[in-house]
Image (spheres, rainbow, N blue to C red):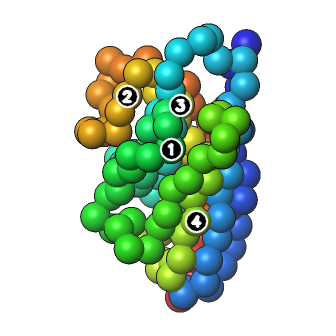
Amino acid sequence: QVQVMESGGGLVQAGESLRLSCTASGLPPASYAMGWFRQAPGKEREGVSCIDWAGVATKYSDSAKGRFTASRDAAKYTQYLQMNNLTPEDTAMYYCAVIKNLNCGKWPSPSDDKYWGLGTQVTVSS
């Protein structure tokens, strides 16, 4: 049984930082990229970051570049998102995705095999 669990969300003030974590377990043997996506009320879910199986290749949304850093540990199934200089526009539910056979050269498509966590709320006050 695949489980994907996020943690680290919370309420912060603008300019502060948060570190999100995601751990996956029970995955069938394969190479998996890990990504962070977010969805604000009334908006579509959007990609924030992606990190490949080796932890080398990364991709960021334009809003995340220069402020957010994705990383993953040697165990491969845990990833982190360090978010600095947060703004109220970053307020959203943040979801972890584990995507099969993705190299993070592009955002995953709806047809890619992926597993989602339930999300962790990030709220940034002005």
Q: Nearer the viewer, residue 16 or 102?
A: 102
Q: Earlier in the sequence, mark 1 or mark 3?
A: 1
Q: Residue at x 54, y 87 (%)?
A: 15
**Residue at the spot of label 3:** 98
Rate crowding at label 3 as few (under 14), some (14 to 19) or many (20 or more) other CA atoms within 10 Å. many
- The amino acid type of the residue labelled 2 equals Leu
Q: Secondary structure at mark 4?
A: strand
- The amino acid type of the residue labelled 3 equals Val
Distance of label 4 from label 1 (alpha carbons): 15 Å
Distance of label 4 from label 2 (alpha carbons): 22 Å
Q: For residue 102, which quarter of the picture? A: top left
**In this rendering, position of residue 96 left or right of residue 75:** left
Q: Residue at x 30, y 28 (%)?
A: 109
The answer to whether residue 39 shows anywhere in this view is no
Q: Position of residue 45 (x, y in %)?
A: 39, 45
* Front of the two marks 2 and 3: 2
Q: Earlier in the sequence, mark 4 or mark 3?
A: 4
**Residue at the spot of label 2:** 102
- The amino acid type of the residue labelled 1 equals Gly
| Circle 1/circle 2 CB separation < 8 Å | no
Distance of label 1 from label 2 (alpha carbons): 12 Å
Quadrant in the picture for the N terminus:
top right
Q: Secondary structure at mark 1?
A: loop
Q: Position of residue 50 (x, y in %)?
A: 42, 45
Rate crowding at label 4 as few (under 14), some (14 to 19) or many (20 or more) other CA atoms within 10 Å. some
Q: Is residue 112 above or below residue 16?
A: above
Q: Is residue 29 above or below residue 17?
A: above
* Front of the two marks 1 and 3: 1
* Front of the two marks 4 and 1: 1
**Residue at the spot of label 1:** 55
**Residue at the spot of label 4:** 82
Q: Secondary structure at mark 2?
A: loop
